[in-house]
Amino acid sequence: MISTHAPVSDVDIFSDEVLTDPYSAYEDLRGLGTAVYLSRHDCWALPRYAQVRAALGHHGRFSSVGSVGLEPALNERRSGGVLASDPPEHDVLRGVLSESLAPRALARLRTDIGRRAEDLVAPLVERGTFDVVRDLARVFPVSVVADLVGMPLAAREEVLRFADAFFNTFGPLNDRTKESLPVADALFDRLTTMMSRDNLEPGGWGEAVYRAADQGVIGEHQVVPLLRAYLVASMDTTINAIGSGLWLLAERPEAWQALREDRSLVPLVFEEILRYESPVQMFFRRTTCPVEYEEAVIPEQARVALLFGSANRDPGKWTDPERFKLDRAPMDHVGFGYGVHGCAGQGLARIEAQAIFSALLDRVDRVELAGSPRRHLNNVIRGLDSLPVTVTTRRV
């Protein structure tokens, strides 16, 4: 039940039209209020920055347990995983790889990741024309993360298909979700086999997770779901941010020139990409008590969509938010979430993306579109399926 005066919208935030260009819908939702009831999906939405960040920071009121997706039946399938748990259970699961993802451990990877980026970028630049998404963005993070996990080569192509299907299941039971369910199930079984103890390379994240199970820190049944979560979550943001970022820069040659002249802007522009084109557009939560806002009270046990993509374009937080600015430095965006469920792999994502941009800047004077970009529609992830570009080799 909703209060009499609560803002209500019948927008379908999972329609093809909205997923293709969600920002006018987000603007309408922000204009309606701090909390808006979405009648088509029987859930609430938080479209403004302040309320999204506050909800992310208060897992006691906005729980992830059985509620990170919209559909209750599909949430049951994620039960007990690192995404669908709260402290203290969540802290135990996340702690298994905390040392591997700590800044000191990641710093030791920076040189190797930079070299790998150069090895991938150099032949693409030599070709002159390539597809950013298919030849670069989908190749690099998968290679890096799979090596860190210790996955066999045969599993790596499967991971991308699984990730897309997996994130579709966070939405409603629309056609995308229905088509993704059998794909996710089949690939999960395959990945389970490929991530067995005997198939993983020694010394990687996979070995560390199995060791935690041997020591009784986590259950044996939690090993593969935990590896799956880290594998998928460590790629989606990086892949889509690289694709969206190079699209934005190809359309703004003056921005590419500015980055060439001042490399200190590279880390900042990655944060602005995450703000402007948030790869993760939303996750859901469940209220554990009534939550009162100025226009409405969200009741206990309500499903709530935290709209990251809308929060990151909120004019109440950002000056001129519809403008892509290299020097904005939006370090408090919610593109990586926030709070206890803030993306565990965000440090790695930053290193990977900065390595790719730096490798391109070393070699390329100009990036131009070589055809029309094609968007890939997913219920909660925003990104491209194809981005053909032509690069002009940097003059020495």
Image (tube, helix red, strand yellow):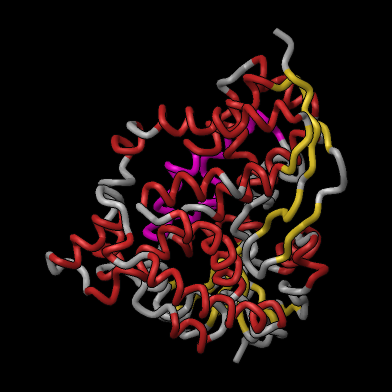
Residue at 62% in and 54% down: 279
Residue 315 is one of the magenta-drawn residues: no
Residue at 54% in and 52% down: 334
276 left or right of 287 in image: right
Where does the magenta region start and end? 325-350
Give the x, y percent position of residue 144.
46, 44
Q: How many marks?
A: 0
As drawn, 182 above or below 51:
below
In the rendered image, the residue lying farthest to the right is: 371
Residue closest to the eye, 191 or 384: 191
Residue at 41% in and 68% down: 83
As drawn, 133 above or below 248:
below
Give the x, y percent position of residue 196.
32, 67
Q: Is residue 301 visible?
A: yes
Q: Which quarter of the image is occupied by the C terminus? A: top right
As drawn, 203 above or below 52:
above
80 left or right of 259 in image: left
Q: Can residue 28 be seen in this view?
A: no
Q: Quadrant of residue 215?
A: bottom left
Q: Which quarter of the image is occupied by the N terminus? A: bottom right
Residue 349 is one of the magenta-drawn residues: yes
Residue closest to the eye, 355 or 90: 355
In the rendered image, the residue lying farthest to the bottom is: 1
As drawn, 2 above or below 250:
below
Give the x, y percent position of residue 260.
67, 18
Residue at 41% in and 56% down: 152
In the rendered image, the residue lying farthest to the left is: 215
Residue closest to the eye, 136 or 261: 136
Residue closest to the eye, 244 or 220: 220
Predominant SS of the magenta segment:
loop
